[in-house]
Image (tube, helix red, strand yellow):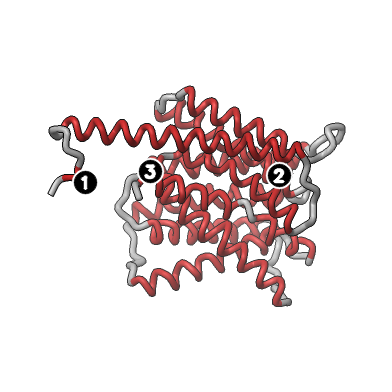
């Protein structure tokens, strides 16, 4: 399997896992657990999982002081994205919030173009437009109902924070394994959540029922451990913008969860929205494969026309 295929596969898994946020958060909210406590359990459980896996694999935990500064920034940015998204669930339906969150690929592409001179290709632009059109169709509310201004602002802040997080990872070259890298992001993310909870005047609430612990574990595993781990792999293999566009599968996941778990209706409009989003994703994948073939051909030509995998 080529690095290009691995990168797209990792980004797709990350997007699907991240789209499961409402699956655990909403039942905990319904049980009276506030946002700060929900996020604390999410990241504390994720940190424990990463620590156990690192110990089993014999990974070293030590990092350099300079890395700690960078990790503190990444952790704070990712925590900001999570906090604002979870707060938005109090102002609008989680499905709508998860759908609006998808503006982050556009923010990612704009940041890469403005600050890092990444060329905006027609393929990338077309993929973003297809995905955004699909997201617009996934909006299931009545058009006459005005979205909460506070909720909308919170989701936009979450999207921008997530875009900054993705771009920052892409610009940081290091030799750490994705496992160790993500572990330290989670460490500083958890510290940021604790600071937010303390500053907001909330206290940590205890989980009382097995169901609450199960929902908290789901939040720690799927949208945190697996999503962050695979997103890190995807960004390093295919870059920030393609990885962000794969995030189009997040609102698709939200729709599937809504239909399968919460028995929401599935309309032609939803089907069209999903098809548009998948079209944008497929367009980016085909572009990536074409670029990989061009790079392989150029490398083979520069080395005498013999591809590396045919050399003895």
Depth check: 123 or 83 in front? 123
The residue positioned 38% from the left and 40% from the top of the image is 171
Work out whether residue 76 can be spotted.
no
Query: In whole angstroms, how far apart are the C-alphas of marks 3 and 2?
Result: 31 Å
The residue positioned 41% from the left and 24% from the top of the image is 119
Q: Earlier in the sequence, mark 1 or mark 3?
A: 3
Q: Residues within 10 Å of mark 1 (few under 14, many from 20)?
A: few
Which x, y percent locates residue 225?
Answer: 51, 61
Q: Secondary structure at mark 3?
A: helix
| Disc 3 and disc 2 in contact, CB within 8 angstroms | no
Q: Secondary structure at mark 1?
A: helix
The circle on residue 97 is 2
Query: In whole angstroms, how far apart are the C-alphas of marks 2 and 1?
Result: 46 Å
Indicate which label's residue lies in the foreground, 3 or 2: 3
Q: Residue furthest top?
A: 122
Which x, y percent locates residue 249?
Answer: 59, 45
Q: Secondary structure at mark 2?
A: helix
Query: In whole angstroms, how far apart are the C-alphas of marks 1 and 3?
Result: 16 Å
Which x, y percent locates residue 76?
Answer: 52, 51
Q: Earlier in the sequence, mark 2 or mark 1?
A: 2
Q: Residue furthest front?
A: 310
> Which residue corresponds to mark 3?
4
Quadrant in the picture for residue 182: bottom left
Depth check: 132 or 201 in front? 132
Q: Earlier in the sequence, mark 3 or mark 2?
A: 3
> Which residue corresponds to mark 1?
309
Which x, y percent locates residue 217?
Answer: 61, 68
Depth check: 268 or 55 in front? 268
């Amino acid at each position: 399997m080529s690095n290009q295929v691995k990168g797209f596969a990792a980004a797709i898994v990350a997007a699907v896992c991240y789209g499961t946020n409402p699956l655990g958060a909403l039942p905990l909210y319904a049980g009276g657990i506030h946002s700060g406590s929900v996020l604390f359990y999410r990241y504390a459980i994720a940190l424990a999982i990463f620590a156990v896996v690192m110990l089993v694999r014999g990974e070293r935990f030590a990092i350099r002081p300079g890395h700690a500064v960078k990790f503190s920034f990444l952790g704070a940015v990712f925590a900001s994205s999570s906090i604002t998204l979870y707060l938005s669930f109090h102002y609008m339906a989680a499905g709508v919030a998860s759908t609006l969150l998808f503006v982050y690929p556009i923010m990612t592409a704009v940041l890469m173009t403005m600050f890092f001179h990444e060329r905006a290709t027609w393929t990338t632009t077309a993929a973003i437009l297809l995905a955004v059109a699909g997201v617009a169709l996934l909006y299931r509310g009545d058009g006459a109902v005005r979205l909460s201004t506070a909720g909308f602002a919170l989701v936009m802040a979450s999207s921008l924070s997530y875009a900054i997080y993705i771009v920052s990872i892409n610009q940081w070259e290091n030799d750490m394994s994705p496992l160790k890298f993500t572990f330290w992001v989670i460490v500083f993310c958890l510290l940021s959540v604790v600071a937010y909870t303390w500053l907001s005047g909330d206290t940590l609430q205890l989980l009382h029922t097995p169901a609450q612990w199960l929902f908290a574990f789901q939040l720690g595993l799927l949208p945190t451990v697996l999503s962050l781990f695979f997103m890190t792999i995807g960004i390093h293999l295919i870059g920030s913008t393609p990885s962000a566009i794969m995030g189009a599968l997040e609102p698709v996941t939200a729709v599937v969860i809504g239909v399968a778990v919460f028995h929401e209706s599935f309309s032609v409009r939803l089907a069209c929205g999903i098809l548009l989003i998948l079209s944008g994703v497929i367009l980016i994948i085909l572009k990536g494969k074409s670029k990989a073939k061009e790079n392989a051909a150029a490398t083979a030509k520069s080395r005498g026309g013999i591809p590396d995998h045919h050399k003895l």
